[in-house]
Image (cartoon, rainbow, N blue to C red):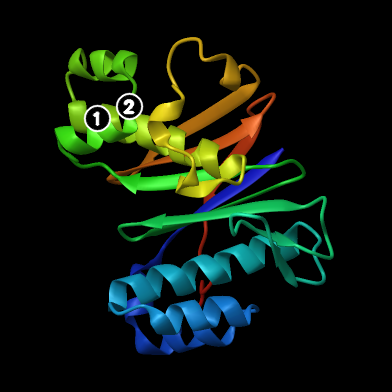
């Protein structure tokens, strides 16, 4: 089972709640990352994602949240190697997925990225499929969240070219891969795992009751 939650970080425009979010960051790396963000919206997303992840991991039973990092920078819990998690954020949504198997998650605001980006990300069969869709922006965003969640699942990040594999059709590399996708407000969210797609999705409010 994969537990996935999304958090609308708009409430962190409140400086009191933003201060609480910073106080609740369990990871020095995440606090430093928040401070490096130039724009307030990016600070909110980064801080919100950290609080959300910490809460979900503790709910899943983690007592020590010490991080390790994979070859390409994917974080994991060094004291709980059997507990996997992944983060993403876009627009005003922060997302975290927690599971007992490797998992990748991505969220992207639905928008038109243009033909150059489509050609960079997609194989010819995917471009042909895009050309048949009534809502091309939504269709491309669907392809993108699937590709991004897959490369986050395998831990390569964007060192793996997104056009080197296809998320539609019969790419043998993805034979055992499952995608679970939802639209949340103006964004698409996708969780990628291997095997059966057993994903529980819910909204999250770390500061409910303020």
Q: Residue at x 74, y 71 (%)?
A: 65
User: Does residue 42 appear to the left or right of 132 in the view shown?
Assistant: right
- Classify 10 Å Cα crowding around label 2: few (below 14), some (14-19), many (20 and above): many
- The residue where tag 2 is placed is 122
- The residue where tag 1 is placed is 119
Using the image, determine if residue 92 lies above or below residue 210: above
Q: Residue at x 26, y 19 (%)?
A: 127
Using the image, determine if residue 118 lies above or below residue 176: below
Q: Quadrant of residue 184?
A: top left
Is the residue under label 2 in contact with that under label 1 (CB below 8 Å)?
yes
Q: Position of residue 161 (x, y in %)?
A: 43, 37
Q: Nearer the viewer, residue 103 or 117?
A: 117
Q: Nearer the viewer, residue 125 or 133?
A: 125
Using the image, determine if residue 204 lies above or below residue 142: below
Q: Position of residue 183 (x, y in %)?
A: 37, 38
**Can residue 210 be seen here?**
no
In the rendered image, the quadrant that contains the N terminus is top right
**Can residue 74 be seen here?**
yes
- Label 2's element? loop
Using the image, determine if residue 110 lies above or below residue 204: above
- Label 1's element? helix
Task: Give the Cα distance between marks 1 and 2.
Answer: 5 Å
């Amino acid at each position: 089972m994969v537990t996935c939650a999304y958090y609308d970080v708009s409430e962190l425009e409140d400086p009191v709640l933003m201060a609480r979010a910073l106080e609740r960051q369990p990871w020095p790396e995440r606090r430093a990352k928040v401070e490096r963000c130039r724009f307030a919206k990016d600070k909110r997303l980064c801080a919100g994602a950290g609080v959300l992840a910490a809460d979900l991991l503790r709910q899943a039973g983690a007592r020590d949240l010490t991080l390790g990092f994979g070859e390409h920078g994917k974080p994991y819990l060094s004291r709980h190697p059997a507990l996997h998690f992944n983060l993403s954020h876009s627009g005003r949504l922060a997302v975290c997925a927690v599971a007992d198997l490797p998992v990748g998650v991505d969220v992207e605001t639905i928008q038109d990225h243009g033909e150059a980006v489509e050609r960079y990300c997609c194989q010819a069969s995917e471009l042909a499929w895009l050309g048949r869709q009534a809502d091309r922006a939504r269709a491309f965003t669907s392809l993108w969240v699937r590709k991004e969640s897959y490369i986050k699942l395998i831990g390569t990040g964007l060192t793996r070219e997104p056009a080197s594999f296809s998320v539609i059709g019969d790419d043998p590399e993805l034979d055992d891969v499952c995608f679970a996708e939802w639209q949340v407000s103006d964004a698409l969210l996708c969780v990628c795992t291997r095997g059966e797609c057993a994903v529980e999705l819910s909204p999250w409010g770390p500061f409910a009751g303020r």
